[in-house]
Image (cartoon, rainbow, N blue to C red):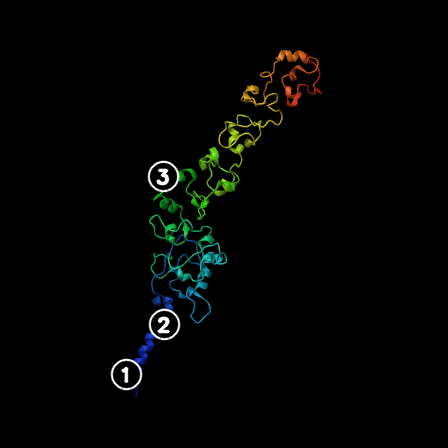
Amino acid sequence: MHGPLFSRVTLLAMAATLAGLALAAGLGGGAMFSPGQLHAGDSAVTTLGGVTSHAALGHDCAACHAAPWGTERMADRCLACHEDTRAELGDSTALHGALDDPRNCLACHDEHLGATARLTRFTGFTVAHGQLGFPLDAHQATAGGRPFGCGDCHGGDSFRWEPARCESCHREYQPAFVTAHVRDWGTDCRSCHDGADRFSRGRFSHDTTGLRLDGAHAKTACADCHTGVTTLPGFARAPSDCAGCHARDDEHRGEFGRDCGACHDTRSWEGARIRHDVFPINHGSRRPSPCSTCHENRADYRQYTCYNCHEHSRDRVLRQHRGEVRTTNLDDCVRCHAGGREHGGHEGWGGDDD
């Protein structure tokens, strides 16, 4: 004789209950065992795995949860839909490829917390941020002194960088600087800043560019030379020689070439040392003559005269050279008297054309 626990009525009741549970589970796809509602997502999001949100899989537990007796991991089910994430795993410079354990999805992402709950936790994991092209050397603590959290710079669940967060944070302790900086360079901070803050005061040396900023250039503002530039490649395309900036106001009109340093130093335009390779300006004198002695027209240094020093006048020169040199060539003394020699060569000058 069996006890009441194993009576025919009890066994039938238990069987009916189990059958009901099995039927409910079958019809509900396992939803009755769900620990909570799945994230509803955004209907505008691109379809992944045939659905636009996890909530659409609420009746299909197996879509995400692998059987405990199998070899497949839950991460394998995640990556079957999230192909963009799977593509990052082999790339150490991509977000998921830089994680310590990129296949441990649950280390960062939660579910069953409600239709509008966040899917991403910003704690409990580490990222080799330097591998992503933006080391955190200059972002160890916020303006308030606390350590930076991911959410301080990245909004939402996608870890997208939001430029407005850089600007708002820096304005807390650099309001005047940020206002001027945004005015000159725009708001796309990452187009120039790489996290190592190589261009901050005290770290960046213009010497590394091949153009040292000393003398009158030492206090030149970046925007004075790098006009309309908002990216690092744009900075690299800036002129690297004097003429690149000063050609537009060159009073020599290009006659002295582009090597400004041949005569000028960076302290001032004044006090230039003229290198006269064609004609020595100290001939017949121990001291160089002022430029204006020979070049009366500062707007055109191609023009010169020898009459301000020499005792002869143009009329006298004309009389002395009659029949030897064309009248039209008499003002270009250097053509014959190279180096200031009294007797030069007149070959090819022809006779008098009067």
Few, some or many residues within 10 Å of mark 1 (<14, 14–19, 20+)? few
Examine the image and state in which quarter residue 282 appears: top right
The answer to whether 114 appears left or right of 218 in the picture is left
Near-viewer residue (272 or 232): 272
Is tag 3's residue or tag 2's residue first in the polypeptide sequence?
Answer: 2
Answer above or below: position of 271 versus 190: above
Above or below, 211 relative to 53: above
Q: Secondary structure at mark 2?
A: helix
Q: Amino acid at mark 1?
A: Pro
Label 2, residues with CA under 10 Å away: few <14, some 14-19, many ≥20: few
Q: CA distance from mark 1 to mark 2?
A: 25 Å
Q: Secondary structure at mark 3?
A: helix
Looking at the picture, which amino acid does disc 2 mark?
A: Ala
Q: Which residue is mark 2?
A: 22
Q: Which mark is residue 176?
A: 3
Closest to the camera, between mark 3 and mark 2, is 3
Q: Quadrant of residue 12?
A: bottom left
Q: Amino acid at mark 3?
A: Ala
Report the label total.
3
Name the foreground residue: 230 vs 221.
Answer: 221
Question: Quick one: label 1 or label 2, which is nearer the N terminus?
Answer: 1
Tell me, yes or no, whether the two marked residues, 1 and 2, touch with CB atoms within 8 Å. Answer: no
Residue located 44% across and 36% down the image: 221
Q: Residue at x 38, y 69 (%)?
A: 26
- Near-viewer residue (5 or 140): 140
Q: Which residue is mark 1?
A: 4
Question: Are the residues at dot 3 and dot 1 in contact (C-beta closer than 8 Å)?
Answer: no
